[in-house]
Amino acid sequence: MMELPDLVAGGLAAGTLSALALGGGLLRLRRQQTRQRAEIAALRTQLEGSARAFTAEVEHLAGRRVPAAARQVAHPHVSEPGPLQPLTTGTPLGIALENVVSALQSEVAAQRTRVDAAAQAGMRGATREIQAALYRLQDALRGLQQRYDEPELAQTLFRLDHENEQSLRRAQVTAVVCGAWVGLAREESHLVDAVTGGQARLAGYHRVQVHNHLETGTALVSHAVEPVAIIVAELLDNALRHSAPDTDVVVSLEHVHHGVCVTIDDAGLGMTRDERDRAQRLVAGDDLILLTDLGDPPRMGLAAIGRLTRQFDLGVDVSSASPYGGVRAVLRVDSHLLSRLDPADRPPAASAPRTTRRVTADRPAPSHAYGTESGVPEAAPGHHEPSDTDGLPQRRRRTRAAAPEESPARRAAHTTTHRPARRPEEAAAALGALQSGTAAARAAADYAGADGHGDTPAARTGETDHTDHTDHTDHTDIEGEAAR
């Protein structure tokens, strides 16, 4: 039988072991609770940091990225800042923020296009009314020119008519940029007349030198006449504005393989590479044209050229420098826009520059040369005998005696080249005769064209249709003769 002390000792031992086990468990629980509290504190700190980072990212999005993204729609060169925390790139948060920026830019672009289209529609309607008023003023001025023969009054009317023509050109260019049609129906015309007609619409037309190297009779189809005149006028306007007033702008009309090129060279300051690239994008007509992209005030010349090149399948290049240090602009008119007019039936304007081509009916043209005409008579005997120097044939100058039969107007222009310069009284008489619309007026215009004024704008052809604007040059031509 176990004694009492042994039982007590065993109970105490068991109690001690239980207490030790319970103490160890409590210690483990406390340590676990401490770790959990530390983890909770760390998670709370991380969550607070994430919330602060998310708040900062949203503030960065609203304060910098969204305004930059909106500006980038109108100005692509503006750089858009990235996320504030680069580590967010590629994460769900970063992707969501990028989607916000993209959606914003799409909506801004759509609203910008819609607002600009509304502005263009309003401006198109306003310019239509302005054009109608200017046409009415033009008709009134022409009526006064035909009614009165007093030279000084006629001179003033000519000046007003020319100023009105320049205002009409600006309204027409604005309408074209805003999506309107050119608004003028023209019949087939000599290409040189379209070029000098565009020249006639400018204040500084006297600084333009036109060199005509085209085959006689080279013309434009009817729907290309007015677009070519507008494009030439705008290219010449840029050349005149960006070159010194004592320098000339040189225009050359040349045949090329696929048609005709009108080359315009100025002696201005030229353009930087960025300016040249932007100008080339505008004249190409491939990009959407918005009024807000054209500056303040809007510069619409190149934009109008871009509209017309796209609509009428023309080509314009302004990416080259001219030999004079300025800008070279080249207008290319392809063969499908070219036609031919018989110079005997419909000669060019009297003051239009005569062609420098020497291929005439007295000698058959080479098969590769431009200006070949069918049915021409054989050449004179003396033109088939080359003069050799060191084995190289030398070209012999042809005389006027070998020229074919010319029209009376052309013959009168040639015969007047040797006349002395007119006195002021004769110029005043020619001015009055021009206003009466008689045959003497046309003879006077032919005389003015042959007497050293081939580089002035085209002379009035006598048409009554107010839509033909190539006839404004002789206003200033006769004005200069009367003031001489």
Image (cartoon, rainbow, N blue to C red):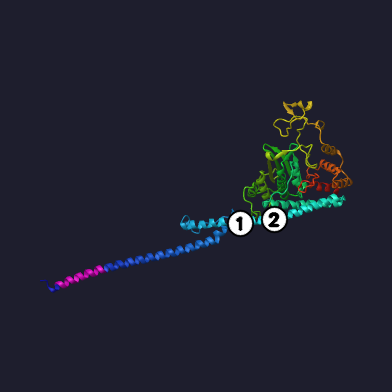
Where residue 419 appears, as percent x and y from the top left, is 87, 39
Query: Disc 2 marks which residue?
Result: 125
The front one of 270 and 229 is 229
Kindly report the distance in space between the C-alpha atoms of the residues bearing marks 2 and 1.
Answer: 20 Å
Q: Is residue 16 magenta?
A: yes
Mark earlier in primary sequence (2, 1): 1
Where residue 139 appears, as percent x and y from the top left, is 79, 51
Identity, as a three-letter code, of the amino acid under mark 2: Gly
Identity, as a three-letter code, of the amino acid under mark 1: Arg
The front one of 56 and 416 is 416
Tag 1: Cα neighbours inside 10 Å, few (<14), some, or many (≥20)?
some
Residue 296, can we see it?
no
What residue is at 71 percent from the left and 54 percent from the top?
127
Residue 151, placed above or below residue 256 = below
Callout 2: SS: helix
Q: Quadrant of residue 323?
A: top right
Residue 258, can we see it?
yes
What residue is at 40 percent from the left and 64 percent from the top?
43
Magenta residues, start to end:
6-22
Q: Could you tell me which quadrant the N terminus lies in?
A: bottom left
Query: Disc 1 marks which residue?
Result: 112
Callout 1: SS: helix
Where residue 357 appears, as percent x and y from the top left, is 75, 35
Residue 266, placed above or below residue 217 = below
In front of the other: label 2 or label 1?
2
